[in-house]
């Protein structure tokens, strides 16, 4: 009998083959009391284990095949940086001294404390960073307990073409497994924004996560199908199911090969309307893919990752150096830097802020530009760094979560002050730098015409626009049924924004997930959208639909969608 288990799809593609189950990666930290005179030895034991963990990670980084994107090493570097962080180098030592406990237990207490902080974050991207902490701590624990790395226990050839099933996988495991030629992976835990998930997409490994209970149902050497498109794993499929998926696999392969030729083709509708396709980028590792898919530039560079895994906000110089690296990587393509979108629910160490208490309804609280204006000393270094970097390549500034005109004017004023400061110090910047705003709050969509008069471009953030229009928390499963991009209220706000941009003769882009979902492409074209900013992984699919569409024929579809939900 075929068993089917549904998880979360994180990386597309179909894989068929034998399962290899990676054994349970839970490491139980023993707890025991030590004597005062043993404290120094215990600390040395911990320090040695940390040193070994660093060496292991460096060795893995060196084993990354040269054919793999250079930036993949960034994922390993993130773990190496954690091994240098005071939270792991000093806190466990303090716990050993204070509690007179063994190194493993001190490490476990500190890991639990860090994970709790991340658990409280309502932002999915940030909350999944706790996976990284657990992976790093498990590595140290394993060394302290003299256990072998899970993957090292296997002959590597054994993993070739296998569907790997595990509790969870670290980014380092993922890189190694790709090297060993695995066909796909599935994990019991993890979310779609974990580093491992991002890596799977980058490395094009079909993957499904969040398969709760899978371990009980999947055995080693089971024959299985992993469908990364729908997030399903099918165990011991019968002949009919197997043939269906083998055909589907062939079709998908053919489809993707056929899309390749679109890389250098313009995005242009049948009736000759040019559409701009830009990329959404989050991590330095994503920049290489911008050129791979022939994107016209970066329409959304989320800068929140700069603030993670650290105690204080990045300095102006750190911002500046990062942006310069990005500009170099883009070799002349335009870069839209979104100023930091943290706050309230997205409290991270790296914000270095004083007010840390949580409020109810954090999504409606002090976040993004609201936080930046309340704490200008937190905002200015980023703005100044963007301005300085703009002397070296085409950069645009994009402000998230604008709600009223006063906020916009305050930001514009602050940018002008910084420009004057730079002028006084004879520091170069792009004097005509374009400043745009994200339209992701209904209030700003309704008044988009007023914003459009003072800004150089608008970008519709549907992820938030849908949440605020439908009065639901975008990460709350219980109200997820209301998270509907096709609700006429959402579509009307999108249309108002596009019309406002057209009237003011400024570009309007869409950078929320909706822009990259090909089932919505025609409707968005019908609403008049001319610029899409999407994840590189789905860009060619969207381009294909654009190139097959006659926009002048979409009037009926668009009218219907604006009136009801059944398009
Ligand atoms: C959005 O809200 O659509 C958006 C692109 O921003 P984020 O998902 O980072 O909030
Ligand atoms: Mg947003």
Image: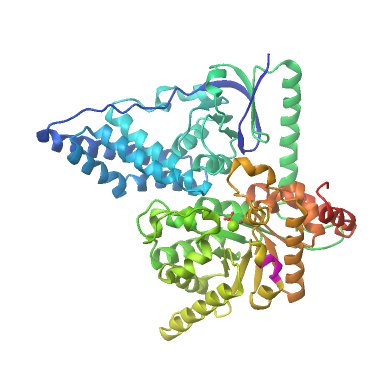
| Residue 99 colored in magenta in the image | no
Q: Is residue 181 above or below residue 68?
A: above
- Residue 414 picture location, percent across and down: 49, 77
Would you say 482 lies left or right of 212 here?
right
* Residue 232 visible in the snapshot: yes
Q: Quadrant of the N terminus?
A: top right
Q: Quadrant of residue 19?
A: top right
- Residue 299 picture location, percent across and down: 62, 61
* Residue 275 visible in the snapshot: no
Q: Residue at x 79, y 62 (%)?
A: 528
Would you say 423 lies left or right of 440 here?
left
Q: Residue furthest front?
A: 360
- In the image, the segment drawn in magenta is 444-448
Q: Quadrant of residue 102?
A: top left
Q: Is residue 17 above or below residue 301?
A: above
State the residue in front, 445 or 555: 445
Q: Residue furthest bottom?
A: 424
- Residue 215 picture location, percent across and down: 52, 22
Q: Is residue 383 above or below residue 492?
A: below
For the image shown, how many numbered marks are present on the structure?
A: 0
Q: Residue at x 27, y 33 (%)?
A: 105
State the residue in front, 502 or 95: 95
Ligand 1 located in image quadrant: bottom right
State the residue in front, 106 or 235: 106
- Residue 120 picture location, percent across and down: 45, 46
Q: Residue at x 58, y 63 (%)?
A: 401
């Amino acid at each position: 009998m075929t068993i089917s288990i549904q998880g979360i799809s994180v990386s597309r593609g179909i894989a068929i083959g034998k399962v290899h189950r990676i054994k349970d990666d839970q490491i139980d930290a023993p707890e025991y009391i030590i004597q005062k005179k043993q404290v120094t030895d215990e600390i040395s034991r911990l320090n040695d284990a940390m040193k070994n963990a660093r060496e292991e990670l460096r060795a893995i980084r060196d084993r990354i095949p040269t054919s793999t994107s250079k930036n993949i090493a960034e994922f390993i570097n993130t773990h190496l940086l954690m091994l240098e962080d005071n939270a792991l180098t000093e806190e466990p030592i303090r716990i050993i001294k204070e509690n007179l406990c063994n190194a493993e237990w001190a490490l476990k207490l500190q890991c639990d404390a860090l994970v709790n902080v991340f658990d409280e974050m309502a932002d999915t991207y940030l909350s999944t960073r706790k996976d990284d902490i657990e992976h790093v701590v498990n590595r140290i624990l394993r060394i302290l307990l003299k256990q072998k790395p899970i993957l090292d226990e296997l002959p590597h050839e054994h993993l070739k073409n296998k569907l790997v099933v595990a509790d969870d996988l670290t980014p380092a495991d993922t890189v190694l497994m790709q090297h060993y030629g695995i066909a796909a992976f599935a994990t019991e835990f993890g979310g779609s924004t974990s580093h491992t998930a991002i890596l799977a997409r980058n490395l094009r490994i079909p993957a499904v996560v969040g398969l709760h209970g899978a371990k009980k149902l999947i055995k080693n050497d089971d024959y299985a199908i992993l469908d990364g498109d729908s997030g399903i794993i099918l165990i011991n499929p019968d002949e009919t199911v197997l043939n269906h998926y083998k055909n589907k696999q062939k079709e998908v392969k053919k489809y993707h090969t056929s899309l390749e030729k679109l890389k250098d083709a313009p995005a242009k509708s049948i009736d000759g309307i040019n559409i701009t396709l830009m990329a959404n980028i989050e991590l330095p590792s994503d920049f290489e893919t911008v050129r791979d898919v022939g994107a016209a530039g970066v329409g959304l560079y989320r800068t929140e990752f700069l603030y993670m895994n650290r105690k204080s906000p990045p300095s102006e110089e750190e911002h500046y150096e990062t942006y310069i690296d990005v500009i170099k990587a883009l070799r002349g393509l335009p870069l839209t830097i979104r100023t930091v979108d943290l706050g309230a629910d997205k409290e991270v160490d790296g914000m270095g802020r004083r007010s840390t208490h949580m409020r109810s309804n954090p999504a409606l609280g002090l976040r993004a530009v609201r936080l930046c204006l309340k704490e200008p000393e937190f905002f200015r270094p980023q703005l100044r760094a963007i301005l300085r970097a703009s002397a070296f390549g085409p950069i645009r500034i994009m402000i998230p979560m604008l709600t009223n005109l006063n906020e916009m004017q305050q930001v514009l004023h602050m940018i002008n002050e910084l420009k004057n400061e730079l002028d006084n110090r004879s520091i170069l910047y792009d004097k005509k730098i374009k400043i745009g705003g994200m339209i992701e709050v209904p209030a700003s969509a309704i008044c988009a015409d007023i914003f459009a008069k003072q800004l150089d471009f608008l970008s519709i953030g549907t992820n938030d626009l849908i949440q605020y229009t439908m009065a639901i928390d975008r990460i709350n499963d219980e109200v997820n049924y209301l998270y509907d991009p096709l609700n006429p209220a959402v579509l009307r706000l999108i249309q108002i924004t596009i019309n406002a941009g057209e009237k003011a003769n400024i570009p309007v882009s869409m950078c929320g997930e909706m822009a990259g979902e090909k089932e919505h492409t025609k409707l968005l074209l019908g609403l008049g959208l001319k610029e899409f900013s999407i994840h590189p992984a789905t860009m060619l699919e969207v381009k294909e639909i654009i190139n097959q569409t006659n926009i002048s024929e979409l009037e009926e579809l668009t009218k219907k969608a604006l009136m009801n939900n059944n398009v």
